[in-house]
Image (spheres, rainbow, N blue to C red):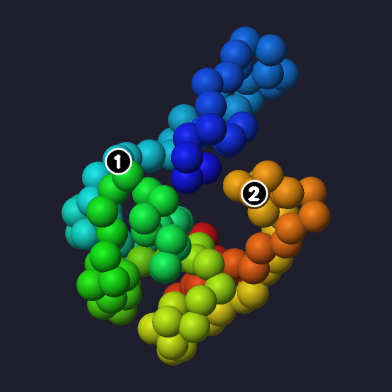
Amino acid sequence: GSKVSTFGVGFKDVSAIKNLQAVHERLSKVLIENKSFDEILQIHDSERTLFFIDPPYHGTEKYYTALFTEDDHIRLKNILDNIKGRFILSYNDDEFIRNLYSDYHIETIERNNTLSAKSNSTKYKELIIMNYWKLRI
C-alpha cells in the first residue's frame, strides 16, 4: 500500500501460518530482488525467464517513495520491447499506458480498492499487459 499502513505492507506474525513449510518449498527456487528494473531485466533476461513487473502506477507516482518519472515509464517499455523473456506487467487502467503498450496483449481486470478507506465499495480497474498469448513454460 502506498502509505505503508495497509494490511499488505504491515508487519505480521507468520508463526501462525498453516503450511509455512509448503510455502517455503514453493518459493525455494524463486528469485526476489530489489534493484532497478533496467538492471534486473539485463541481468536475468533469457528465453526461459518470466518477469512479473509492477511499477508505480502512471499518474500516482507522488504516493511512492521511489522517484519514477514519465520518462521511466517510457524507458521501461523500450527495454521490454527488446527482452528475450516473457513478462506480465501490472498497471492502472490509464490512457497513456494503454497507448504506450498498444502493441501488446492487454487484459482489463477489476479488483477491490484495498488502499481506499471505502475499500468494500470501491472497484479499481487495472491492466495486465503481456508479451505472449499463452504461457508455455
| Residue depicted at 42% across the width and 68% down the height | 58
- Mark 2 element type: loop
Alpha-carbon neighbours of circle 1 within 10 Å: few (<14), some, or many (≥20)? few
Residue named by callout 2: 116
Which labelled disc corresponds to residue 79?
none
Tell me where residue 109 sits by quadrant.
bottom right
Residue named by callout 1: 34
Give the image location of residue 21, x and y in percent.
Answer: 61, 19
Give the image location of residue 12, x and y in percent.
Answer: 58, 19
Give the image location of residue 102, x and y in percent.
Answer: 46, 88
Q: Nearer the viewer, residue 44 or 122?
A: 122
Residue lying farthest to the front in this orientation: 117
Relative to 121, say whether 8 is above or below. Answer: above
Give the image location of residue 55, x and y in percent.
Answer: 39, 58
Q: Nearer the viewer, residue 62 or 99?
A: 62
Q: Is residue 65 left or right of residue 114?
A: left
